[in-house]
Image (tube, helix red, strand yellow):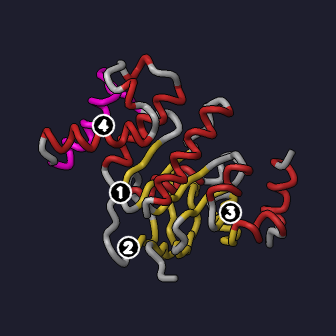
């Protein structure tokens, strides 16, 4: 399988602290989940990939340009309706008013929020706001969707709904790259696991193999601590 992104000796230093340390990695799976302990560099790595941060060293190479969208743990909602929040992203892409409205309503329907289209987005529950954020990303029809702990602050029912939406987006052909602390979720979503520890990639392994027999002591310790 051809890699859609290759990182060569990627690094990020802040002051005297090396956050990402000499990461060389090729991503080719459609659904990749990045795991690791708190402070390992998971979110930072995703922000480097999305271009929100500039590396201090190394390169990211895209064999072909991929349209991207990113959804964060705490979604940013504009002071307007759920529908207008989704339309806003589409307007930035330059679609016509009619096309923006059509695609935004379709995206809200995909995430089960068509009935709340005219509700002020900031008055929605946390789970509903995250679904609006996913609709806003999905409406853009990205080739790559980057998700940083998308269910970390949600209750179990909301987490399941967000997970369903992520799987639906993946089924539409979009590549998924995400972080999570929910190991059950990682098992259900991922094709492969990238395990990062202290800013370094410790292993990159098919999901079933990672949970059955992690290769590195760091991953073994992580699973032992995190598994109930």
Q: Which residue is tagged 4?
A: 105
Classify mark 1: helix, strand or loop: loop
Query: How far, Cα to Cα, is label 4 from label 2?
Result: 32 Å
Crowding near the residue tagged with mark 3, few <14, some 14–19, many ≥20 C-alpha atoms within 10 Å:
many
Does residue 84 belong to the magenta stretch? yes
The residue shown at (63%, 40%) is: 160
Chain-order first, disc 3 or disc 2: 2
Classify mark 3: helix, strand or loop: strand
In terms of depth relative to the viewer, which is nearer, 83 or 69? Answer: 83
Chain-order first, disc 1 or disc 4: 4
Which mark is drawn over residue 62? 2
Classify mark 4: helix, strand or loop: helix
Q: Are marks 1 and 4 in contact (CB under 8 Å)?
A: no
Q: Nearer the viewer, mark 1 or mark 3?
A: 1
Does residue 169 belong to the magenta stretch? no
Chain-order first, disc 4 or disc 3: 4
> Relative to 63, is 90 above or below?
above
């Amino acid at each position: 399988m051809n890699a859609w992104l290759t990182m060569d000796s990627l690094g990020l230093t802040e002051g005297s602290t090396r956050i990402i340390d000499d990461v060389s990695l090729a991503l080719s799976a459609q659904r990749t989940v990045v795991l690791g302990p708190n402070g390992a560099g998971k979110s930072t790595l995703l922000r480097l990939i999305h271009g929100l941060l500039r590396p201090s060293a190394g390169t990211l190479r895209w064999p072909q340009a991929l349209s991207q969208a990113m959804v964060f743990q705490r979604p940013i909602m504009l002071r307007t309706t759920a529908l207008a929040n989704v339309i806003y992203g589409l307007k930035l892409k330059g679609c016509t008013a009619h096309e923006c409205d059509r695609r935004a309503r379709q995206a809200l329907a995909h995430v089960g929020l068509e009935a709340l289209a005219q509700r002020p987005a900031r008055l929605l529950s946390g789970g509903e706001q995250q679904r609006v954020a996913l609709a806003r990303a999905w409406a853009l029809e990205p080739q790559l969707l980057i998700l940083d702990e998308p269910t970390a602050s949600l209750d179990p029912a909301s987490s399941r709904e967000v997970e369903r939406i992520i799987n639906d987006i993946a089924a539409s052909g979009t590549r998924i790259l995400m972080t999570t602390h929910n190991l059950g979720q990682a098992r259900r979503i991922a094709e492969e696991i990238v395990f990062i520890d202290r800013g370094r990639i410790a292993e990159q392994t098919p999901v079933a193999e990672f949970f059955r027999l992690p290769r590195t002591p760091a991953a073994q310790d992580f699973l032992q601590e995190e598994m109930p």
